[in-house]
Image: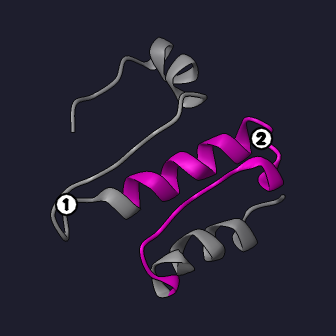
Amino acid sequence: MAEVPVQAEGALLWRKVFLEGIAGSGKTTYAVQHMRAWLAQGADPSRLLIIVPQQPMARPYQLALHESEY
């Protein structure tokens, strides 16, 4: 994954994100970190849509949401 300049991170944060890749490539890790960044910037959790192919794959997002202050 390419590094994003710090000044560009805020602008890119609010864009829609679509991730695809092989198992173990870091998709979930990136997406959970991205979701945490949205929440830290004041995103309304009820306005976030995260789609996963199977219910158990939603667990990391649920845990991150419950661990956040929101």
Would you call the spot at circle 1 few (<14 residues within 10 Å), some (14-19), or many (20 or more)?
Answer: few
Q: Which mark is residue 57?
A: none
Q: Is residue 19 above or below residue 32?
A: above
- State which quadrant residue 29 falls in: bottom left
Judged from this view, the residue extending furthest toward the left is: 22
Q: Which residues are magenta?
A: 29-55
Describe the element under mark 2 as helix, strand or loop: loop
Percent x, y of residue 10: 57, 21
Q: Work out whether mark 1 precedes mark 2 in sequence or the reverse, and give the earlier one.
A: 1
Quadrant location of the N terminus?
Answer: top left
Tell me if mark 2 has few (under 14), some (14-19) or many (20+) residues whose alpha carbon lies within 10 angstroms of its own: some
Residue picked out by circle 1: 25
Q: Position of residue 43 (x, y in %)?
A: 77, 41
Q: Position of residue 52 (x, y in %)?
A: 47, 69
Q: Which amino acid lies under the numbered mark 1 shown in the image of this protein?
A: Ser
Q: Quadrant of the C terminus?
A: bottom right
- The residue pinned by badge 2 equals 43
Query: In the image, residue 34 lies at what x, y percent?
Result: 52, 46
* Mark 2: amino acid: Ala
Q: Is residue 47 rendered to the left or right of residue 20?
A: right
Residue pushed farthest front?
Answer: 53
Residue 43 within the segment the image draws in magenta? yes
In which quadrant of the rendered view does residue 62 lie? Answer: bottom right
- The outermost residue toward the top is 7
| Residue pictured at 32% horizontal, 57% vertical | 27
At horizontal 50% and vertical 23% (from top left) the residue drawn is 12
At mark 1, the secondary structure is: loop
